[in-house]
Image: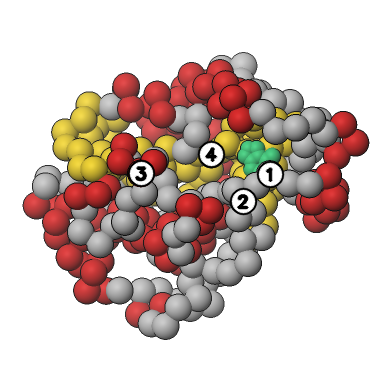
Amino acid sequence: MIKTITETTDYLKNKGFENPEIGIILGTGLGQLINDIEILHEVSYNHIPNFPTATVEFHKGKLIYGVFEGKKVIVMQGRFHLYEGYTLQDVTYPVRIMEQLGIKTLLVSNAAGAINLNFKKGELMLIEDHINLQGSSPLAFKGVELLGERFADMSAPYNAEINSKFKNIAKANNITLHEGVYASVVGPQLETRAEYRMLKILGTDAVGMSTVPEIIVANHLKLKVAAISVLTDECDPNNLKPVNIAEIIEMAGKAEPIMVKLFKELIKTL
Ligand code: HPA
């Protein structure tokens, strides 16, 4: 993997992706952040050597380099999911590239279902810890020890200092920001009532189909990380209605300006 990482990194450096400080993965709910970035360079995923092969959906996936609130950032517009048929190594490959390019901090967003029924759809949750329910690890491959410690420490995967800044920013701006445990499932099917009950018993506050692999690799690479979920639906097993993807997307869109505000204010402090 080292050879392909070097090749990808060199390609991007030649495209002008020089010394970014912060990496941002724009999941559902953060797309608008792009409007506030002074874009210097951008490349479609399908032009980047060794990037996971683009699916049809992925034609619009782009890696963006620019200046955001005075900081050099590299932004993933669109991420790779396990449910699209990629491997966990594919899904996390861009994190390894961003680290090689120089980032020290990784910020992530996603859409998730609220298992904790005190949390309402349209609200945000700061991820304080996670549970990996995707059945494998992005670190489970031959040669991983050449890229970092095989037995990566996960005692504090989310950076306490950044989380505390997020909480202060939320408070100062009257934004409801819950804190909780995010569990990652493979998807793409939504959960059954029995699965939602199980997730609650396990200590989950929000469930989604992404983020955990990227956070594991970011910790493997000793990056500082923080992640926020937009809660798009309420997962009440005793009152479960058929999934409404349109509503999930609408909820994510509604929360987007608030999420962007949090990220903007945070980046000023980094
Ligand atoms: N389950 C899994 N992923 C999700 C959900 C959910 O209820 N809502 C948004 N992403």
Question: For the residue with label 1, is its CB less than 8 Å from the closest atom of ligand 1?
Answer: yes
CA gap, disc 4 and disc 2: 14 Å
Q: Which residue is mark 3?
A: 56
Q: Label 1 near label 3: C-beta < 8 Å?
A: no
Residue depth check, mark 2 versus mark 3: number of the one nearer the observer: 3
User: Label 3 amino acid?
Assistant: Val
Residue drawn at point x = 31 percent, y = 56 percent: 53
Where's residue 255, x and y in %? 56, 22
Residue depth check, mark 3 versus mark 1: number of the one nearer the observer: 3
Residue depth check, mark 4 versus mark 2: number of the one nearer the observer: 2
Secondary structure category for the residue under label 4: strand
Q: Quadrant of the C terminus?
A: top left
- Quadrant of the image where one finds ligand 1: top right
From the viewer's side, name the closer residue of 170 and 32.
Answer: 32
Secondary structure category for the residue under label 2: loop
Q: Earlier in the sequence, mark 4 or mark 2?
A: 4
Q: Quadrant of residue 43?
A: top left
CA gap, disc 3 and disc 1: 22 Å
Q: Which residue is mark 4?
A: 110
User: Label 2 amino acid?
Assistant: Gly
Residue 168 - label: none
Q: Is residue 167 left or right of residue 101?
A: right
Q: Which residue is mark 2?
A: 187
Residue depth check, mark 3 versus mark 4: number of the one nearer the observer: 3
196 is higher (above) or lower (below) than 27: below
Where's residue 14, x and y in %? 9, 52
Q: Which residue is mark 1?
A: 190
